[in-house]
Image (cartoon, rainbow, N blue to C red):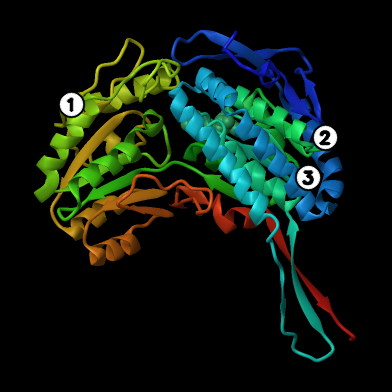
């Protein structure tokens, strides 16, 4: 398919193993479609156990030399990768939109965000510092060294096909690890384009492998291999649970970014326009297909009606259509299953008493953005991730009620709180069980800040100094006889 690339070399339909572009051993492929039309746009190799084991072996062979490179040299290669990514922004965005659906402007934003992780870890990777601790006797010294974990594996989802990859690959490579990536079967082309750019930047053969295909088989090979020392996974909690079990026999380090059920608290003392703006950002980015999307918008009674009225006007005005068309704000959902799930959650809420107050116009096949009020805890949308453009409003009375409602979930990834009272901002941000709190903002994803969850939302952090630490082991060297 011609998706209008300037650099057609970025359109890769093969897997990357040991520095070479390969087909599946049995020649099978998996088609990939455009969610806006369901037209097939290309195909990738249907790899399985054998190809994955080859990629792991290549990563293990490449490890000693990569690990031994001085950090500034590794980071210089990553800096070139970053620069190539930025230069190819338009093409990468076209690929991303073709397979994922989000509006082109948003896709370009994601490429910038994806590149920002590489930039961050280029810098952070040169500052991974050990230290010396005072020894108990005069003849001893104790050094604490930071060393790369070794061969790593990454499994990534379809909602942010570029950024979910660079936030794993960049710190791994900067730390001196080698890594095998399994991108989502729904969005492999962005991953393969990033792989092509990594090769052009000088990432040596084997240091980065990208295996497309059969999720279960590739996942089993990655998690089962004793050579793989760490798994970083972003996706659903059920798959995260399974992968954690599969990693148990070989005691791998784990970084898991799983589901969320983000509460978005709006207090009576919030600045109304700012709260609406923040809610729009937290809810409708990527058509709501994000693990930090505001799943439950909790609004205090005194500001409830005014907030709903303004949000309704914004929801009705959203422009919905193919990501490649001009001025679109909301693209298609990823597939039929996603559309059906959102429709079911809305029907369930309405059957249990919710009111549909506003709806945008949307072409056929597209899920219209909606605003529901009168939401209650017994509804499915209160417990499950909506993962679609539906703003669901719950009314609460006191601060304590709001906090209790916010925390009434087994998840703890993102939370948001809009208030003009600094004491309340402090109290609420401490009381929320979560890895992240957005105070008067719906935007909490930045390369320099640690991103991750508590409770069943996962383990570990990506971004920030913590994001590099995930890929480092600590070694204590005891030196005696001085
Ligand atoms: P989502 O709801 O975002 O699709 P998933 O957890 O289903 O979340 O998918 C996230 C990633 O996990 C994708 O790359 C998918 O292919 C992969 N995946 C799904 N099932 C398995 C499995 N059994 N083993 C390994 N990877 C899997």
Q: Which residue is mark 3?
A: 227
Quarter occupied by residue 352: top left
Residue 393 image position (x, y, % from top left)? 20, 39
Q: Report the mark closest to the observer, 3 or 1.
A: 1
Question: Considering depth in this image, is 300 or 433 the residue closer to the camera?
Answer: 300
3 horizontally vs 61: left or right: left
Q: Earlier in the sequence, mark 1 or mark 2?
A: 2
Q: Secondary structure at mark 1?
A: strand
Residue 469 image position (x, y, % from top left)? 63, 58
83 horizontally vs 345: left or right: right
Residue 384 image position (x, y, % from top left)? 35, 36
233 horizontally vs 372: left or right: right
- Label 3 within 8 A of ligand 1 by Cβ: no
Residue 254 image position (x, y, % from top left)? 61, 49
Answer whether residue 34 is visible to the viewer in this image: yes
208 relative to 215, above or below: below
Q: Earlier in the sequence, mark 3 or mark 1?
A: 3
Q: Which residue is mark 2?
A: 205
Q: Quadrant of the N terminus?
A: top right
Q: Report the mark closest to the observer, 3 or 2.
A: 2
Quarter occupied by residue 23: top right
Q: Earlier in the sequence, mark 3 or mark 2?
A: 2
Q: Which circle marks residue 358 in the picture?
A: 1
72 relative to 228, above or below: below
Question: Considering depth in this image, is 159 or 478 the residue closer to the camera?
Answer: 159
Taking the spot 14% from the left edge, 31% from the top edge, the residue there is 353
CA gap between label 3 and label 2 equals: 18 Å
Question: Considering depth in this image, is 450 or 85 the residue closer to the camera?
Answer: 85
The crowding category of the residue bearing disc 3, from other C-alpha atoms within 10 Å (few below 14, some 14 to 19, many at least 20), is some
- Label 2 within 8 A of ligand 1 by Cβ: no
CA gap between label 3 and label 1 equals: 53 Å
């Amino acid at each position: 398919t011609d998706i209008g690339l300037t650099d057609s070399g970025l359109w890769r339909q093969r897997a990357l193993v040991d520095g070479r572009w390969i087909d599946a051993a049995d020649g099978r492929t998996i088609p990939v479609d455009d969610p806006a039309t369901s037209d097939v746009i290309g195909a990738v190799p249907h790899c399985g156990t054998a190809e994955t084991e080859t990629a792991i072996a290549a990563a293990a062979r490449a490890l000693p030399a990569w690990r031994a490179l001085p950090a500034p040299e590794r980071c210089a290669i990553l800096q070139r990768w970053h620069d190539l990514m930025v230069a190819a922004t338009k093409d990468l965005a076209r690929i991303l939109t073709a397979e994922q659906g989000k509006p082109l402007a948003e896709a370009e934003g994601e490429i910038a965000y994806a590149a920002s992780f590489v930039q961050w870890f280029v810098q952070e990777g040169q500052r991974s510092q050990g230290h010396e601790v005072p020894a108990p006797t005069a003849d001893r010294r104790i050094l604490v060294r930071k060393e790369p974990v070794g061969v790593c594996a990454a499994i990534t989802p379809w909602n942010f096909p570029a950024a979910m990859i660079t936030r794993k690959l960049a710190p791994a490579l900067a730390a001196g690890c080698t890594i095998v990536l399994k991108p989502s079967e729904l969005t492999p082309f962005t991953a393969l384009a990033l792989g092509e750019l990594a090769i052009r930047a000088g990432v040596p053969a084997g240091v980065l492998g990208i295996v497309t295909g059969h999720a279960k088989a590739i996942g089993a090979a990655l998690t089962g291999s004793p050579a793989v020392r760490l798994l970083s996974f972003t996706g659903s909690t059920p798959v995260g649970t399974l992968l954690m079990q599969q990693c148990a026999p070989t005691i791998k380090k784990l970084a898991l970014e799983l589901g969320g059920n983000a509460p978005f608290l709006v207090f009576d003392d919030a600045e109304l326009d700012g709260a609406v703006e923040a809610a729009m950002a937290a809810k409708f980015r990527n058509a709501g297909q994000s693990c930090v999307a505001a799943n439950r918008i909790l609004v205090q009674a005194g500001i409830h009606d005014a907030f709903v009225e303004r949000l309704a006007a914004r929801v009705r005005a959203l422009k919905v259509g193919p990501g490649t068309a001009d001025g679109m704000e909301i693209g298609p959902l990823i597939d039929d299953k996603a559309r059906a799930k959102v429709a079911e959650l809305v029907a369930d809420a309405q059957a249990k008493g919710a009111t549909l107050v506003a709806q945008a116009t949307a072409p056929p096949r597209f899920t219209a953005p909606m605003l529901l009020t009168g939401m209650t805890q017994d509804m499915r949308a209160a417990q499950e991730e909506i993962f679609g453009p539906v703003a669901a409003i719950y009314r609460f009375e006191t601060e304590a009620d709001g906090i209790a409602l916010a925390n009434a979930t087994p998840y703890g990834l993102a939370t948001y709180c809009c208030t003009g009272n600094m004491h309340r901002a402090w109290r609420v941000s401490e009381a929320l069980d979560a890895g992240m709190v957005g105070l008067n903002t719906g935007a909490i994803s930045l390369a320099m800040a640690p991103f991750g969850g508590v409770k069943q939302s996962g383990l570990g952090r990506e971004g920030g100094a913590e994001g590099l630490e995930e890929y480092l082991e600590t070694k204590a060297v005891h030196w005696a006889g001085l």
